[in-house]
Image (spheres, grey):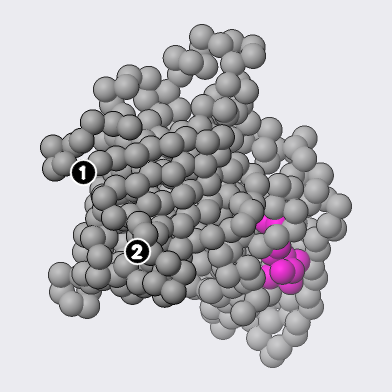
Amino acid sequence: LSHPSPSHKKIIFKTFHNQQLKTITMFKVSASVLDLKKPDPKVLDTGIGFFDHMLDQLNSHAQVGVSVEVKRLGENVEESSGKNRFANSDQKEIVEIVGDALGCGIQNILENARSQSCVDNKREILDKEFSSRFCCPLDEALVECIITIPTSKEDVGAIDFALAPYGIYPAGGRTKIGEWKTENIEHFFDTVATKMGARISLKKIRGHNGHHVVESAFKAFSRALRNLIDSMSGKTEAIMWGPSSESFFAGSKLERTGSLSRKTKETSISVDLKLDGTGKSNINTGIKVMDGLLTNIVDGSGISLEVECNGDLWVDDHHTTEDVSIAIGQVLNKALGSKGGLNRMWTASHNFPGGATVEVVMDLSNRPCLTHDLKLAEYNEEKVDDMSIEMIEHVFDSLVMNGQMTVHIVQLKGGRAGELTTAAAIAFGKALGRCIAVDPRRAGATASSKGTLSV
Protein backbone atom coordinates (compact mmCIF):
# COMPACT_ATOMS: atom_id res chain seq x y z
CA LEU A 1 0.00 0.00 0.00
CA SER A 2 1.50 3.28 -1.09
CA HIS A 3 1.23 6.63 0.58
CA PRO A 4 -1.71 8.77 -0.51
CA SER A 5 -0.91 10.89 -3.54
CA PRO A 6 -1.13 14.71 -3.42
CA SER A 7 -4.75 14.46 -4.59
CA HIS A 8 -5.41 12.01 -1.73
CA LYS A 9 -6.16 9.11 -4.06
CA LYS A 10 -5.37 5.78 -2.50
CA ILE A 11 -3.46 3.42 -4.79
CA ILE A 12 -3.41 -0.35 -4.32
CA PHE A 13 -1.06 -2.37 -6.52
CA LYS A 14 -0.68 -6.13 -6.47
CA THR A 15 1.54 -8.07 -8.84
CA PHE A 16 1.07 -11.72 -9.80
CA HIS A 17 3.16 -13.75 -12.25
CA ASN A 18 1.35 -12.50 -15.34
CA GLN A 19 -1.37 -10.37 -13.90
CA GLN A 20 -1.64 -6.91 -12.42
CA LEU A 21 -4.52 -5.59 -10.34
CA LYS A 22 -4.60 -1.88 -9.69
CA THR A 23 -7.33 0.32 -8.26
CA ILE A 24 -7.52 4.10 -8.17
CA THR A 25 -10.45 5.68 -6.35
CA MET A 26 -13.53 4.24 -8.10
CA PHE A 27 -11.97 1.88 -10.65
CA LYS A 28 -10.02 -1.34 -10.71
CA VAL A 29 -8.37 -3.10 -13.63
CA SER A 30 -7.19 -6.66 -14.03
CA ALA A 31 -4.82 -7.30 -16.91
CA SER A 32 -2.73 -10.17 -18.19
CA VAL A 33 0.06 -9.83 -20.75
CA LEU A 34 1.52 -13.02 -22.22
CA ASP A 35 4.18 -13.38 -24.91
CA LEU A 36 3.22 -15.64 -27.82
CA LYS A 37 0.29 -17.04 -25.87
CA LYS A 38 -3.43 -16.44 -25.98
CA PRO A 39 -4.98 -15.12 -22.78
CA ASP A 40 -7.44 -17.48 -21.15
CA PRO A 41 -10.00 -16.14 -20.91
CA LYS A 42 -9.56 -13.32 -23.42
CA VAL A 43 -11.41 -10.30 -22.09
CA LEU A 44 -11.15 -6.80 -23.53
CA ASP A 45 -13.53 -4.64 -21.59
CA THR A 46 -12.40 -1.19 -20.51
CA GLY A 47 -15.89 0.25 -20.72
CA ILE A 48 -14.79 2.28 -23.77
CA GLY A 49 -15.52 0.33 -26.94
CA PHE A 50 -13.01 1.86 -29.34
CA PHE A 51 -10.26 1.61 -26.72
CA ASP A 52 -10.97 -2.13 -26.51
CA HIS A 53 -10.69 -2.44 -30.29
CA MET A 54 -7.31 -0.71 -30.29
CA LEU A 55 -5.95 -2.90 -27.49
CA ASP A 56 -6.92 -5.95 -29.54
CA GLN A 57 -4.28 -4.91 -32.09
CA LEU A 58 -1.66 -6.09 -29.57
CA ASN A 59 -3.13 -9.58 -29.75
CA SER A 60 -3.18 -9.65 -33.55
CA HIS A 61 -0.02 -7.76 -34.46
CA ALA A 62 2.35 -7.97 -31.48
CA GLN A 63 1.39 -11.60 -30.83
CA VAL A 64 1.16 -10.60 -27.19
CA GLY A 65 -1.84 -12.06 -25.43
CA VAL A 66 -3.63 -9.19 -23.75
CA SER A 67 -6.65 -9.41 -21.51
CA VAL A 68 -8.04 -6.31 -19.78
CA GLU A 69 -11.09 -5.75 -17.64
CA VAL A 70 -12.07 -2.51 -15.90
CA LYS A 71 -14.71 -2.36 -13.21
CA ARG A 72 -16.05 0.26 -10.90
CA LEU A 73 -15.52 -0.64 -7.28
CA GLY A 74 -18.61 -2.23 -5.83
CA GLU A 75 -20.54 -2.53 -9.11
CA ASN A 76 -22.58 -5.66 -9.72
CA VAL A 77 -22.91 -7.64 -12.92
CA GLU A 78 -25.96 -5.74 -14.14
CA GLU A 79 -24.24 -2.39 -13.69
CA SER A 80 -21.08 -3.56 -15.47
CA SER A 81 -22.75 -4.34 -18.79
CA GLY A 82 -22.35 -2.14 -21.87
CA LYS A 83 -19.28 -1.70 -24.05
CA ASN A 84 -19.32 2.08 -23.52
CA ARG A 85 -20.56 2.19 -19.95
CA PHE A 86 -17.58 4.37 -18.85
CA ALA A 87 -17.74 6.75 -21.82
CA ASN A 88 -18.93 9.58 -19.57
CA SER A 89 -16.63 8.70 -16.67
CA ASP A 90 -13.09 9.93 -16.06
CA GLN A 91 -11.54 8.40 -19.18
CA LYS A 92 -8.09 9.73 -18.36
CA GLU A 93 -8.07 7.76 -15.13
CA ILE A 94 -9.18 4.58 -16.89
CA VAL A 95 -6.59 5.05 -19.63
CA GLU A 96 -3.89 5.59 -17.02
CA ILE A 97 -4.58 2.46 -14.99
CA VAL A 98 -4.87 0.33 -18.13
CA GLY A 99 -1.65 1.78 -19.57
CA ASP A 100 0.09 1.29 -16.24
CA ALA A 101 -0.89 -2.39 -16.03
CA LEU A 102 -0.06 -3.17 -19.66
CA GLY A 103 3.23 -1.28 -19.49
CA CYS A 104 4.32 -3.32 -16.49
CA GLY A 105 3.36 -6.55 -18.25
CA ILE A 106 5.28 -5.57 -21.40
CA GLN A 107 8.33 -4.65 -19.33
CA ASN A 108 8.33 -8.16 -17.84
CA ILE A 109 8.27 -9.65 -21.35
CA LEU A 110 11.16 -7.42 -22.47
CA GLU A 111 13.24 -8.29 -19.44
CA ASN A 112 12.66 -11.99 -20.07
CA ALA A 113 13.67 -11.50 -23.70
CA ARG A 114 16.84 -9.69 -22.66
CA SER A 115 17.73 -12.43 -20.20
CA GLN A 116 17.62 -15.00 -23.03
CA SER A 117 20.37 -13.08 -24.81
CA CYS A 118 22.62 -12.75 -21.78
CA VAL A 119 24.03 -16.28 -21.96
CA ASP A 120 26.95 -15.53 -24.29
CA ASN A 121 27.82 -11.97 -23.38
CA LYS A 122 25.84 -10.68 -20.46
CA ARG A 123 27.53 -7.32 -20.06
CA GLU A 124 27.22 -6.43 -23.76
CA ILE A 125 23.49 -7.18 -23.78
CA LEU A 126 22.82 -5.37 -20.52
CA ASP A 127 24.60 -2.24 -21.74
CA LYS A 128 23.04 -2.25 -25.21
CA GLU A 129 20.34 0.17 -26.31
CA PHE A 130 17.60 -1.54 -28.31
CA SER A 131 15.37 0.21 -30.81
CA SER A 132 12.61 -0.90 -33.16
CA ARG A 133 10.83 1.06 -35.90
CA PHE A 134 7.71 0.14 -37.81
CA CYS A 135 5.24 1.97 -40.05
CA CYS A 136 1.70 0.71 -40.52
CA PRO A 137 -0.07 1.38 -43.84
CA LEU A 138 -3.81 1.83 -43.96
CA ASP A 139 -5.64 3.13 -47.00
CA GLU A 140 -6.19 6.49 -45.32
CA ALA A 141 -3.31 6.73 -42.86
CA LEU A 142 0.38 6.01 -42.32
CA VAL A 143 1.93 6.24 -38.85
CA GLU A 144 5.53 5.63 -37.79
CA CYS A 145 6.37 4.14 -34.38
CA ILE A 146 9.83 3.95 -32.82
CA ILE A 147 10.31 2.16 -29.50
CA THR A 148 13.67 2.56 -27.78
CA ILE A 149 14.92 0.84 -24.65
CA PRO A 150 17.64 3.26 -23.48
CA THR A 151 20.66 2.42 -21.40
CA SER A 152 19.99 5.33 -19.05
CA LYS A 153 16.95 5.25 -16.80
CA GLU A 154 16.84 9.02 -17.02
CA ASP A 155 15.69 8.72 -20.63
CA VAL A 156 12.80 6.40 -19.81
CA GLY A 157 9.25 7.53 -20.42
CA ALA A 158 9.93 10.35 -22.87
CA ILE A 159 7.41 10.31 -25.73
CA ASP A 160 7.45 12.09 -29.07
CA PHE A 161 3.79 12.19 -30.06
CA ALA A 162 2.42 13.81 -33.24
CA LEU A 163 -0.84 12.23 -34.41
CA ALA A 164 -3.24 15.18 -34.24
CA PRO A 165 -5.34 16.36 -35.88
CA TYR A 166 -7.39 13.18 -35.96
CA GLY A 167 -8.90 13.59 -39.39
CA ILE A 168 -10.10 16.65 -41.28
CA TYR A 169 -13.78 16.65 -40.31
CA PRO A 170 -14.07 19.00 -38.52
CA ALA A 171 -11.08 21.14 -39.47
CA GLY A 172 -9.41 20.61 -36.11
CA GLY A 173 -9.93 16.84 -36.20
CA ARG A 174 -12.20 14.52 -34.25
CA THR A 175 -12.49 14.91 -30.49
CA LYS A 176 -13.86 11.39 -30.05
CA ILE A 177 -13.51 8.18 -32.05
CA GLY A 178 -16.48 6.12 -31.08
CA GLU A 179 -16.74 7.12 -27.44
CA TRP A 180 -12.99 7.38 -26.77
CA LYS A 181 -11.82 10.95 -26.34
CA THR A 182 -8.79 11.55 -28.54
CA GLU A 183 -7.20 13.78 -25.90
CA ASN A 184 -6.47 10.61 -23.90
CA ILE A 185 -4.58 8.70 -26.61
CA GLU A 186 -1.26 10.42 -25.93
CA HIS A 187 -1.71 9.88 -22.19
CA PHE A 188 -2.11 6.15 -22.75
CA PHE A 189 1.13 5.81 -24.69
CA ASP A 190 2.97 8.08 -22.25
CA THR A 191 1.91 5.84 -19.36
CA VAL A 192 2.84 2.67 -21.26
CA ALA A 193 6.26 4.10 -22.17
CA THR A 194 7.03 5.02 -18.58
CA LYS A 195 6.03 1.66 -17.15
CA MET A 196 7.74 -0.46 -19.81
CA GLY A 197 10.98 1.53 -19.43
CA ALA A 198 10.99 2.89 -22.97
CA ARG A 199 10.89 5.94 -25.17
CA ILE A 200 8.06 5.88 -27.68
CA SER A 201 7.77 8.03 -30.78
CA LEU A 202 4.49 8.06 -32.71
CA LYS A 203 4.29 10.31 -35.75
CA LYS A 204 1.67 10.61 -38.45
CA ILE A 205 3.34 10.62 -41.86
CA ARG A 206 0.02 11.11 -43.63
CA GLY A 207 -3.64 10.52 -42.95
CA HIS A 208 -6.98 12.29 -43.11
CA ASN A 209 -9.25 9.68 -41.47
CA GLY A 210 -9.20 9.91 -37.68
CA HIS A 211 -10.22 6.31 -37.04
CA HIS A 212 -7.47 5.02 -39.31
CA VAL A 213 -4.82 7.35 -37.89
CA VAL A 214 -5.35 5.89 -34.42
CA GLU A 215 -5.62 2.33 -35.74
CA SER A 216 -2.39 2.79 -37.71
CA ALA A 217 -0.69 4.04 -34.53
CA PHE A 218 -1.72 1.02 -32.47
CA LYS A 219 -0.79 -1.42 -35.23
CA ALA A 220 2.58 0.28 -35.77
CA PHE A 221 3.24 0.15 -32.01
CA SER A 222 2.26 -3.52 -31.89
CA ARG A 223 4.50 -4.47 -34.82
CA ALA A 224 7.42 -2.44 -33.49
CA LEU A 225 6.95 -4.14 -30.11
CA ARG A 226 7.01 -7.64 -31.67
CA ASN A 227 10.23 -6.86 -33.52
CA LEU A 228 11.71 -5.34 -30.36
CA ILE A 229 10.95 -8.46 -28.33
CA ASP A 230 12.51 -10.64 -31.02
CA SER A 231 15.59 -8.41 -31.24
CA MET A 232 16.10 -8.34 -27.47
CA SER A 233 15.92 -12.13 -27.36
CA GLY A 234 18.71 -12.36 -29.94
CA LYS A 235 16.57 -13.13 -32.99
CA THR A 236 18.01 -11.14 -35.87
CA GLU A 237 16.19 -10.65 -39.18
CA ALA A 238 18.42 -13.33 -40.71
CA ILE A 239 17.48 -15.78 -37.99
CA MET A 240 13.80 -14.94 -38.26
CA TRP A 241 13.35 -14.64 -42.04
CA GLY A 242 16.58 -15.63 -43.81
CA PRO A 243 17.11 -18.57 -46.20
CA SER A 244 18.08 -20.86 -43.32
CA SER A 245 15.17 -19.82 -41.12
CA GLU A 246 12.20 -21.82 -39.96
CA SER A 247 10.07 -19.27 -41.78
CA PHE A 248 11.71 -19.99 -45.13
CA PHE A 249 11.29 -23.75 -44.81
CA ALA A 250 7.66 -23.34 -43.73
CA GLY A 251 6.99 -21.24 -46.82
CA SER A 252 8.74 -23.71 -49.11
CA LYS A 253 6.48 -26.51 -47.91
CA LEU A 254 3.44 -24.55 -49.06
CA GLU A 255 4.65 -24.57 -52.70
CA ARG A 256 3.09 -21.17 -53.33
CA THR A 257 3.06 -20.67 -57.07
CA GLY A 258 0.91 -19.05 -59.70
CA SER A 259 0.73 -18.77 -63.46
CA LEU A 260 -1.37 -16.96 -66.02
CA SER A 261 -1.64 -16.62 -69.77
CA ARG A 262 -3.74 -13.92 -71.37
CA LYS A 263 -4.15 -12.63 -74.89
CA THR A 264 -5.89 -9.56 -76.24
CA LYS A 265 -5.61 -7.54 -79.43
CA GLU A 266 -3.02 -5.40 -77.61
CA THR A 267 -0.83 -7.89 -75.71
CA SER A 268 0.00 -11.57 -75.36
CA ILE A 269 1.35 -12.33 -71.89
CA SER A 270 2.50 -15.35 -69.88
CA VAL A 271 3.53 -15.15 -66.21
CA ASP A 272 4.97 -17.83 -63.92
CA LEU A 273 5.70 -16.95 -60.30
CA LYS A 274 7.07 -18.83 -57.32
CA LEU A 275 6.89 -17.02 -53.99
CA ASP A 276 9.45 -19.20 -52.24
CA GLY A 277 11.93 -19.06 -55.03
CA THR A 278 15.59 -18.36 -55.57
CA GLY A 279 15.40 -14.73 -56.65
CA LYS A 280 15.87 -15.67 -60.30
CA SER A 281 14.02 -13.90 -63.08
CA ASN A 282 13.55 -14.20 -66.81
CA ILE A 283 11.65 -11.15 -67.93
CA ASN A 284 11.08 -9.97 -71.48
CA THR A 285 8.42 -7.32 -71.99
CA GLY A 286 10.08 -5.55 -74.90
CA ILE A 287 10.65 -2.49 -72.68
CA LYS A 288 14.11 -2.36 -71.13
CA VAL A 289 13.16 -0.15 -68.18
CA MET A 290 10.10 -2.28 -67.42
CA ASP A 291 12.26 -5.40 -67.43
CA GLY A 292 14.68 -3.70 -65.05
CA LEU A 293 11.91 -2.53 -62.73
CA LEU A 294 10.47 -6.02 -62.39
CA THR A 295 13.94 -7.53 -61.98
CA ASN A 296 14.60 -5.11 -59.12
CA ILE A 297 11.41 -6.25 -57.40
CA VAL A 298 12.48 -9.87 -57.81
CA ASP A 299 15.98 -9.16 -56.48
CA GLY A 300 14.57 -7.39 -53.42
CA SER A 301 11.93 -10.00 -52.61
CA GLY A 302 13.66 -13.31 -53.38
CA ILE A 303 10.72 -14.63 -55.42
CA SER A 304 11.18 -16.27 -58.83
CA LEU A 305 9.44 -14.69 -61.82
CA GLU A 306 9.21 -15.42 -65.52
CA VAL A 307 7.40 -13.00 -67.82
CA GLU A 308 7.00 -13.02 -71.59
CA CYS A 309 5.06 -10.32 -73.36
CA ASN A 310 4.48 -9.54 -77.00
CA GLY A 311 2.76 -6.16 -77.03
CA ASP A 312 1.77 -3.45 -79.50
CA LEU A 313 4.80 -1.27 -78.80
CA TRP A 314 4.36 0.32 -82.20
CA VAL A 315 1.33 2.05 -80.64
CA ASP A 316 2.85 3.05 -77.28
CA ASP A 317 4.29 1.48 -74.13
CA HIS A 318 0.98 1.94 -72.24
CA HIS A 319 -0.73 -1.37 -73.05
CA THR A 320 2.35 -3.49 -72.36
CA THR A 321 3.31 -1.92 -69.03
CA GLU A 322 -0.28 -1.90 -67.77
CA ASP A 323 -1.22 -5.41 -68.87
CA VAL A 324 2.00 -6.99 -67.59
CA SER A 325 1.56 -5.31 -64.18
CA ILE A 326 -2.08 -6.42 -63.97
CA ALA A 327 -1.12 -10.01 -64.80
CA ILE A 328 1.70 -10.14 -62.23
CA GLY A 329 -0.56 -8.66 -59.55
CA GLN A 330 -3.25 -11.26 -60.26
CA VAL A 331 -0.76 -14.14 -60.15
CA LEU A 332 0.75 -12.81 -56.94
CA ASN A 333 -2.65 -12.61 -55.27
CA LYS A 334 -3.47 -16.14 -56.40
CA ALA A 335 -0.18 -17.53 -55.05
CA LEU A 336 -0.73 -15.85 -51.66
CA GLY A 337 -4.02 -17.67 -51.10
CA SER A 338 -5.79 -16.74 -47.85
CA LYS A 339 -2.62 -15.05 -46.49
CA GLY A 340 -3.09 -17.00 -43.25
CA GLY A 341 0.08 -17.32 -41.16
CA LEU A 342 1.97 -14.65 -43.10
CA ASN A 343 3.87 -11.66 -41.77
CA ARG A 344 1.46 -9.55 -43.83
CA MET A 345 3.05 -6.12 -43.10
CA TRP A 346 6.55 -4.71 -43.47
CA THR A 347 8.56 -1.55 -44.00
CA ALA A 348 11.63 -1.37 -46.26
CA SER A 349 13.74 1.32 -47.91
CA HIS A 350 16.45 1.62 -50.53
CA ASN A 351 19.01 4.26 -51.37
CA PHE A 352 20.04 4.71 -54.98
CA PRO A 353 23.81 5.31 -54.78
CA GLY A 354 24.37 9.03 -54.79
CA GLY A 355 20.71 9.73 -55.47
CA ALA A 356 17.16 8.98 -54.40
CA THR A 357 16.02 7.23 -51.23
CA VAL A 358 12.56 5.67 -51.10
CA GLU A 359 10.66 3.79 -48.41
CA VAL A 360 7.84 1.35 -49.14
CA VAL A 361 5.33 0.34 -46.47
CA MET A 362 3.23 -2.66 -47.48
CA ASP A 363 0.26 -4.58 -46.14
CA LEU A 364 -1.20 -7.67 -47.84
CA SER A 365 -4.55 -6.35 -46.69
CA ASN A 366 -7.04 -7.31 -49.42
CA ARG A 367 -7.86 -3.57 -49.27
CA PRO A 368 -6.03 -2.34 -52.39
CA CYS A 369 -4.76 1.22 -52.25
CA LEU A 370 -1.60 2.96 -53.48
CA THR A 371 -0.46 6.28 -51.98
CA HIS A 372 2.82 7.91 -52.96
CA ASP A 373 4.64 11.22 -53.04
CA LEU A 374 7.29 10.46 -55.67
CA LYS A 375 8.25 13.68 -57.42
CA LEU A 376 8.61 12.12 -60.85
CA ALA A 377 8.03 15.43 -62.65
CA GLU A 378 10.71 17.42 -60.81
CA TYR A 379 13.22 17.31 -63.70
CA ASN A 380 10.56 17.83 -66.36
CA GLU A 381 11.42 14.56 -68.13
CA GLU A 382 9.08 12.66 -70.43
CA LYS A 383 10.79 9.27 -70.46
CA VAL A 384 13.26 7.12 -68.60
CA ASP A 385 15.07 5.58 -71.53
CA ASP A 386 12.37 3.58 -73.38
CA MET A 387 9.54 3.93 -70.85
CA SER A 388 7.15 6.85 -70.39
CA ILE A 389 7.40 8.36 -66.93
CA GLU A 390 3.62 8.59 -66.66
CA MET A 391 3.55 4.78 -66.73
CA ILE A 392 5.76 4.37 -63.66
CA GLU A 393 2.94 5.22 -61.28
CA HIS A 394 0.63 3.10 -63.43
CA VAL A 395 2.87 0.05 -62.99
CA PHE A 396 2.88 0.29 -59.20
CA ASP A 397 -0.86 1.04 -59.11
CA SER A 398 -1.69 -2.00 -61.27
CA LEU A 399 0.52 -4.27 -59.15
CA VAL A 400 -1.04 -3.01 -55.93
CA MET A 401 -4.67 -3.06 -57.04
CA ASN A 402 -4.50 -6.54 -58.56
CA GLY A 403 -2.24 -7.87 -55.81
CA GLN A 404 -4.85 -6.74 -53.27
CA MET A 405 -2.42 -4.84 -51.08
CA THR A 406 -2.14 -1.48 -49.37
CA VAL A 407 1.10 0.32 -50.22
CA HIS A 408 2.52 3.68 -49.23
CA ILE A 409 5.60 4.88 -51.13
CA VAL A 410 7.46 7.65 -49.33
CA GLN A 411 10.19 9.70 -50.98
CA LEU A 412 12.86 10.33 -48.36
CA LYS A 413 15.40 11.90 -50.73
CA GLY A 414 14.83 13.20 -54.23
CA GLY A 415 16.44 12.30 -57.51
CA ARG A 416 15.74 11.90 -61.20
CA ALA A 417 12.78 9.78 -62.25
CA GLY A 418 14.97 6.79 -63.11
CA GLU A 419 16.64 6.86 -59.69
CA LEU A 420 13.30 7.13 -57.89
CA THR A 421 11.92 4.24 -59.95
CA THR A 422 14.85 1.96 -59.14
CA ALA A 423 14.83 2.83 -55.45
CA ALA A 424 11.06 2.35 -55.23
CA ALA A 425 11.18 -1.01 -57.05
CA ILE A 426 13.92 -2.44 -54.82
CA ALA A 427 12.20 -1.18 -51.66
CA PHE A 428 8.92 -2.62 -52.96
CA GLY A 429 10.63 -5.98 -53.42
CA LYS A 430 12.21 -5.92 -49.96
CA ALA A 431 8.88 -5.15 -48.32
CA LEU A 432 7.13 -7.83 -50.38
CA GLY A 433 9.70 -10.43 -49.39
CA ARG A 434 9.05 -9.85 -45.70
CA CYS A 435 5.28 -9.58 -46.08
CA ILE A 436 4.97 -12.97 -47.82
CA ALA A 437 7.20 -14.67 -45.23
CA VAL A 438 5.49 -17.30 -43.11
CA ASP A 439 5.59 -16.69 -39.37
CA PRO A 440 5.43 -20.21 -37.89
CA ARG A 441 4.38 -18.76 -34.54
CA ARG A 442 1.04 -17.80 -36.05
CA ALA A 443 0.29 -21.46 -36.85
CA GLY A 444 -1.61 -20.49 -40.00
CA ALA A 445 -3.78 -17.86 -38.30
CA THR A 446 -4.43 -14.58 -40.09
CA ALA A 447 -2.76 -11.50 -38.63
CA SER A 448 -5.96 -9.55 -38.18
CA SER A 449 -8.22 -8.53 -35.31
CA LYS A 450 -11.10 -9.49 -37.63
CA GLY A 451 -9.72 -13.02 -37.90
CA THR A 452 -9.83 -12.97 -41.70
CA LEU A 453 -8.85 -10.89 -44.72
CA SER A 454 -11.32 -12.56 -47.06
CA VAL A 455 -14.30 -10.32 -46.31
Q: Secondary structure at mark 2?
A: helix
The answer to which of marks 1 and 2 sits earlier in the sequence is: 1
Q: Is residue 354 visible?
A: no
Quadrant in the rendering for residue 171: bottom left
Q: Which residue is drawn at the image coordinates 75% and 82% (left, top)?
A: 262
Asked whether disc 1 touches disc 2, contact meaning CB atoms under 8 Å apart, the reply is: no
Q: Secondary structure of the magenta portion, mostly?
A: loop
* Residue range (magenta): 333-343
Q: Which mark is residue 215?
A: none
Please say if 132 is above or below 207. Answer: above
Please say if 108 is above or below 381. Answer: above
Q: Which residue is drawn at the image coordinates 58% and 21% (left, top)?
A: 115
Q: Is residue 337 magenta?
A: yes
Q: Secondary structure at mark 1?
A: loop
Q: Position of residue 407 (x, y in %)?
A: 49, 63
Which residue has dot 2 on it? 213
Label 2 packing within 10 angstroms: few (<14), some (14-19), many (20+): many
Which residue has dot 1 on it? 9
Q: Position of residue 455 (x, y in %)?
A: 62, 79
Q: Position of residue 134 (x, y in %)?
A: 45, 47
Q: Nearer the viewer, mark 1 or mark 2?
A: 1
Q: Is residue 213 magenta?
A: no
Q: Quadrant of the N terminus?
A: top left
